[in-house]
Image: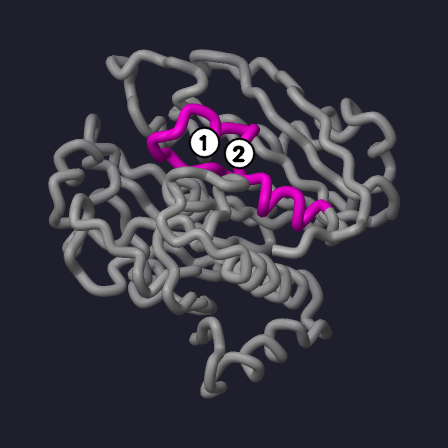
Amino acid sequence: MKQSQTPIISFSPIVLSVPGRHVDLEMKVSAPASGNNLPVILLSHGHGPSNFLSSYKGYGPLADFFAAEGFVVIQPTHQNSKALGLSSSLPEAPLFWSSRANDMKFILDHLDEIISTVPGLNGRVDKAKVAAIGHSMGGHTVAMLAGMDVTDPATGKIVNSIEPRIKAQVLIGVSGGPEGFNGVNRQHYPVLAAGNFGTMTLPALIVNGDKDVNLMFSDVDNWRADAYYQSPGPKDLLTVFGAEHIFGGISGYDARETSDENPERVAFVCQSILAYIRSTFNPNDSSWEQAKKMLNGVQGALGSIESK
């Protein structure tokens, strides 16, 4: 993945106290060193086996790319991160699924405070243009922000965290529907079988790897594309050919958990998401339509796009 020559700044940790949270909310903010009217991306990490990739210290390939492309990227450390060492006996552990969505809302509620904390960023941000990108469990979080109902396994209460302030939603490698969740992890993560994509009404891009198969979760082909097929439009589906769960290495540079390391694939995923966000923010921007023309039906293309 060729690195951009655009200088970026990263500032961390920004620490805010959140009522009811077990620990303070820690964040990293990355942004271009110059420029104005910068849109915002909230980047939600996954769960995973690593100590620090699932925290504000991970996902460098995504954060650095979008910062260099002119975005303010805000990365929270959700409470499921192993870096925090929270007890597995706490309510909602180990995924802390509901608090993850609340983290994102809290960031939006305190956007001015966060921006003012970063030296040189005040007055340069377009706070009306906000996108959310989530990978794996982060995709579940973004699905909730796009309107997916989740029935709390502990209480039976339906939780809806729809967030219309977020104008573009991107779900990467998100868990699929409950009927296809037939692996042993259904016992460990029952909340992943409690979502209803039928209520996910906000526009969203679902990014699915056609080789993203883990029998611990499901043996159903393209299970992780369910968010597209089971939700109402408008939705888009980017299928990345040959991609496994880490999509070539989006969670960290040279991350050992990447089973399909491929810098070209990482660049393709980043560029495709960029095209989607730009066209979602600006209906006159043709980047997404151009991406479709360059992929669909083209021999040797790295992926394909469906829309509804």
Residue type marked 1: Ser
Which residue lies under the disc numbered 2? 58
Q: Nearer the viewer, residue 128 or 286?
A: 286
Image: 52 above or below 71: above
Which residue lies under the disc numbered 1? 54
Q: State the image quarter where residue 110 is shown.
A: top right
Where is residue 271 drawn, in percent x and y? 61, 62
Residue name at image x 31 percent, y 67 percent: 229
Locate the C terminus by quadrant.
Answer: bottom left
Decide if residue 15 is on the left or right side of residue 122. left
Residue type marked 2: Gly
Q: Could you say whether the residue bearing mark 1 is in a helix, strand or loop? A: loop
Residue name at image x 65 percent, y 20 percent: 13
Decide if residue 163 is on the left or right side of residue 150. right
Is 51 magenta? The answer is yes
Query: Can the viewer see residue 188 in this picture?
Result: yes
Where is residue 79 drawn, in percent x and y? 42, 22
Count the labels in the image: 2
Query: Can the viewer see residue 307 in this picture?
Result: no
Where is residue 98 drawn, in percent x and y? 38, 31
Decide if residue 90 is on the left or right side of residue 31. left
Q: Could you say whether the residue bearing mark 2 is in a helix, strand or loop? A: loop
Range shown magenta: 44-67
Q: State the image quarter where residue 118 is shown.
A: top right
Query: CB atoms at circles 2 and 1 under 8 Å apart?
Result: yes
**Neighbourhood count class around disc 1 (C-alpha, 10 Å): few under 14, some 14–19, many 20 upward:** many
Q: What predominant SS class does the magenta segment belong to?
A: loop
Is 196 magenta? The answer is no
**Neighbourhood count class around disc 2 (C-alpha, 10 Å): few under 14, some 14–19, many 20 upward:** many
Where is residue 114 drawn, in percent x and y? 71, 27
Residue name at image x 53 percent, y 34 percent: 58
